[in-house]
């Protein structure tokens, strides 16, 4: 087969991320790992010479139609629904308008391929790529079946989420999953493994590094850090309960609203009540959201980074901690089963088990040499597998395989 026009060289890539803008401040209600992933992937693809446009919903009146994120990457704000923040679980009614906008935009300037992120982006992108016969790849970031299993009646996703996820997986060209656990979950949904490639999330090892300033510590002998969106499934309550068995240790919980709004946050109030009941309120500190530039220093200030989520579709925080040379104690769920090597880069423990979490942390706190070796092994693991350069290279390989498959079908007609 002769190489097609894009077998090598520059691609025009459309990344669709309806609620997770790469421009968003981290730590907000719907701003987390997906925002980091989309921004970092776009930048790493641009570093490989490609032109990338990220399509995200316009959620504020003062946003321009297009904004340059960095060289080779533009963010395009799509007018779909009111120009204000809307919780992501309420965005589905605006996805037809999002899809129509993409169709009009791509009729005039078609990308070589589209790569959608999260299920609603997939629905909008599928509508446009079907009509225009463009290649579509999709990354879920989280699956409705998993969320429903763990949250039950507390799940606020629209009822149509799982059928929509199945439709995107079956009718797009390829699914780009982030971990082995996701492939198995997709198979249970009826999406065959031969439609799926695994490409993990990544981290920037030049930003997240063991070398550099560390945030100031308190008077306690040991410090634990938990970083992420402040929602119950992230397991901060488990960390607080474990703290009762860890004397002379402080827990710093990073995430949630801006610092001056922390005291009014309902989840902070719930967690403080748990800390009060456990007798550790004086050893638990809530910082609220911190600027992205300060996150490495916060992680470097920790003896151990905790990632005790009930479920975790992938989880970028373990990679960030490992890149900073810090051991990680994480729940044995989702992507953390791939990233954290038990007894090598930290420990994996059952989710929702404060006693197991405390036991793993206590053993590491008592052994500085083991902590150091876990941190070094984690750093090496990131450098060998999880840099954004590696992730972009693997993602591009999937893109090119999809383009080659399309060309082969066209040539056979």
Image (cartoon, helix red, strand yellow):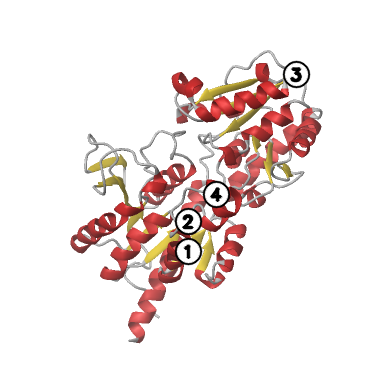
**Depth check, front residue: 5 or 59:** 59
Badge 4 marks a residue whose secondary structure is helix
Indicate the position of residue 98 as horizontal and vertical percent values: 28, 54
Residue 253 appears at what percent x and percent y? 59, 27
Nearest to N terminus: mark 2 or mark 3: 2
Can residue 77 be seen here? yes
Q: Which residue is mark 4?
A: 153
The answer to whether mark 4 and mark 3 are in CB contact below 8 A is no
Mark closest to the chain's N terminus, 1 or 3: 1
Task: Kindly identify the residue that appears in the image at 65 percent across and 50 percent down.
Answer: 333
Helix, strand or loop for disc 3: loop
Q: Nearer the viewer, mark 1 or mark 4?
A: 4
Tell me the CA gap for discs 4 and 3. 38 Å
Which mark, residue 140? 2
Whether pointer 2 and pointer 3 mark residues with C-beta atoms closer than 8 Å, the reply is no
- Foreground pick, 406 / 271: 271
Q: Which residue is mark 3?
A: 248
Q: Is residue 19 left or right of residue 103?
A: right
| Residue 27 disc label | none
């Amino acid at each position: 087969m002769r190489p097609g026009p894009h077998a090598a060289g520059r691609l025009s890539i459309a990344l669709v991320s309806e609620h997770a803008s790469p421009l968003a401040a981290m730590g907000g209600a719907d701003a987390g790992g997906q925002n980091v992933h989309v921004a970092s992937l776009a930048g790493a693809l641009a570093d490989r010479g490609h032109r990338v446009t990220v399509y995200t919903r316009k959620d504020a009146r003062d946003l321009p139609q297009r904004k340059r994120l960095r060289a080779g990457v533009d963010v395009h704000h799509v007018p779909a629904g009111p120009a204000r923040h809307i919780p992501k679980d309420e965005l589905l009614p605006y996805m037809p308008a999002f899809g129509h906008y993409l169709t009009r935009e791509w009729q005039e300037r078609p990308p070589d391929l589209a790569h959608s992120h999260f299920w609603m982006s997939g629905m909008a992108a599928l509508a446009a790529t079907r009509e225009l016969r463009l290649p579509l790849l999709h990354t879920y970031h989280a699956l409705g079946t998993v969320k429903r299993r763990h949250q039950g009646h507390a799940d606020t996703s629209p009822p149509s989420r799982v059928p929509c996820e199945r439709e995107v997986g079956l009718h797009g060209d390829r699914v780009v999953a982030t971990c082995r656990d996701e492939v198995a979950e997709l198979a249970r949904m009826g999406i065959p493994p031969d439609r799926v490639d695994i490409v993990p999330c990544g981290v920037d090892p030049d930003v997240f590094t063991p070398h550099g300033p560390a945030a100031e510590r308190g008077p306690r002998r040991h410090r634990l850090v938990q970083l992420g969106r402040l929602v119950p499934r992230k397991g901060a309550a488990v960390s607080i309960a474990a703290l009762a068995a860890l004397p002379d240790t402080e827990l710093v919980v990073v995430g949630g609203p801006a610092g001056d709004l922390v005291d009014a946050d309902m989840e902070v109030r719930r967690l403080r009540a748990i800390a009060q009941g456990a007798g550790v309120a004086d050893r638990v500190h809530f910082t609220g959201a911190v600027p992205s530039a300060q996150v490495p220093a916060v992680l470097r200030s920790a003896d151990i980074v905790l990632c005790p989520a009930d479920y975790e579709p992938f989880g970028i925080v373990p990679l960030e901690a490992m890149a900073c040379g810090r051991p990680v104690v994480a729940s044995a769920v989702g992507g953390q089963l791939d990233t954290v090597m038990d007894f090598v880069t930290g420990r994996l423990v059952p989710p929702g088990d404060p006693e197991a979490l405390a036991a793993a942390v206590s053993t590491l706190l008592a052994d500085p040499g083991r902590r150091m070796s876990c941190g070094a092994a984690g750093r090496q693991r990131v450098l060998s597998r999880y840099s954004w350069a590696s992730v972009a290279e693997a993602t591009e390989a999937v893109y090119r395989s999809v383009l080659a498959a399309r060309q082969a079908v066209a040539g056979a007609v």
